[in-house]
């Protein structure tokens, strides 16, 4: 008789246990100072989606935070694979967190001997067809996206408290997610997703100037839109331009493409996912298929 599938496992420095049993030192600088970086990869048919792109971004986040990774890409992928296989899940949400490691009670990383690598493998919960059709509401929050000259949003770090607070505030205001403006007054992204909108057949999104995360989904979609001749403009746009959109959507590795059907409580277009949003969702499905590779 086979054991029932576990609902999640975690690998801490290569030791795999059920999720509830994973432990990290209280002196880990990831816990103490948010001094960590991360990636989230999904699988399809037991294989990772866009793994190479996620590993490139992991190394960019490491460089931006002066974190030296003592592993090759193959070693990191092997850890993810081992944890995924131990989970016995058919498909999974795989979160890789690399922290500065345990060290003295000091901001300085110098005393941390080596980074801690944690891999969470959880059931993959995707949007249902009904949820996709219903769409979501966003609220443009007072809370700003971090300035790119501070801890740049381009680095995917464990410092998400600003986004946590923006999300709480958006929910309190009746939305499902926040859209944040940066200190220069330009629209950036949502709390865990890139933002796109369309007006008159052109798709708009914030540029990769450090003010937003370089989403893997974002870049694959932009390249595909360009190949298919969809007019795209990456640029610095203010809230009035965003609010005047015909349709809008969010992108991310787990969510895929989510239609935004309300901004600050007001319907976008006819309040249903628009044609470019549907087209982006269909493109994303094909891109997922095309970027799925063996471990
Ligand atoms: C702030 C932020 N922007 C965008 C994204 C989407 O990135 P990706 O498409 O690589 O999942 C994420 C994903 O977690 C995020 O946290």
Image (cartoon, rainbow, N blue to C red):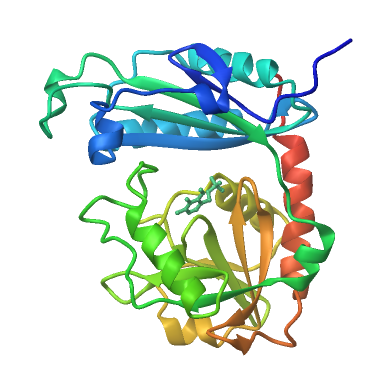
Asked if residue 179 lies left or right of residue 106, the reply is: right
Q: Which quadrant of the structure image shows residue 245?
A: bottom right
Tell me: residue 88, above or below residue 259.
above
Total marks in image: 0
Decide which of 28, 270 is in the foreground and name it.
28
Tell me: residue 63, above or below residue 117.
below
Say which quadrant the C terminus sits in: top right
Asked if residue 245 lies left or right of residue 2, the reply is: left
**Residue ID at (76%, 64%):** 131
Decide which of 142, 229 is in the foreground and name it.
142
Q: Which quadrant of the structure image shows residue 209?
A: bottom left
**Residue ID at (78%, 73%):** 275
Say which quadrant the N terminus sits in: top right
Please say whether residue 210 is visible from this viewpoint: no
Please say whether residue 236 is visible from this viewpoint: yes
Tell me: residue 72, above or below residue 261.
above
Q: Residue furthest right?
A: 1
Q: Position of residue 166 (x, y in %)?
A: 40, 67
**Residue ID at (55%, 14%):** 16
Decide which of 145, 22 is in the foreground and name it.
22
Q: Position of residue 133 (x, y in %)?
A: 80, 69
**Residue ID at (66%, 52%):** 255
Q: Position of residue 262 (x, y in %)?
A: 62, 81
Asked if residue 163 lies left or right of residue 294, the reply is: left
Tell me: residue 64, above or below residue 132.
above
Q: Position of residue 106 (x, y in %)?
A: 10, 31
């Amino acid at each position: 008789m086979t054991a029932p599938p576990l609902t999640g496992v975690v690998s801490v420095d290569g030791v795999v246990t059920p999720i509830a049993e994973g432990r990290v030192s209280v002196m880990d600088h990831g816990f103490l100072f948010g001094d960590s970086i991360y990636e989230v990869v999904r699988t399809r048919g037991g294989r990772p989606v866009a793994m190479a792109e996620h590993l490139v971004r992991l190394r960019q986040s490491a460089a931006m935070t002066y974190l030296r990774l003592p592993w090759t890409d193959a070693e990191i992928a092997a850890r993810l694979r081992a944890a995924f296989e131990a989970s016995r899940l058919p498909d999974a949400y795989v979160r890789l967190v690399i922290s500065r490691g345990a060290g003295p009670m000091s901001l300085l990383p110098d005393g941390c001997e080596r980074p801690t690598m944690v891999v969470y493998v959880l059931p993959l919960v995707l949007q249902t067809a009904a949820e996709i059709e219903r769409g979501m509401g966003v609220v443009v929050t007072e809370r700003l996206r971090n300035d790119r000259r501070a801890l740049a949003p381009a680095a995917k770090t464990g410092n998400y408290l600003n986004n946590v607070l923006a999300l709480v505030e958006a929910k309190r205001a009746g939305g499902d997610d926040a859209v944040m403006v940066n200190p220069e007054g330009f629209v950036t992204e949502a709390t865990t997703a890139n933002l796109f909108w369309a007006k008159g057949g052109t798709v708009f999104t914030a540029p990769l100037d450090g003010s937003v995360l370089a989403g893997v989904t974002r870049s694959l979609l932009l390249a595909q839109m360009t190949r298919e001749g969809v007019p795209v403009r990456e640029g610095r746009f203010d809230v009035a331009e965003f609010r005047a959109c015909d349709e809008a959507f969010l992108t991310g590795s787990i969510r895929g493409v989510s239609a935004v059907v309300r901004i600050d409580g007001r319907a976008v277009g006819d309040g249903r996912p628009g044609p470019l949003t549907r087209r982006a969702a269909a493109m994303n499905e094909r891109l997922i298929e095309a970027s799925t590779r063996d471990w």
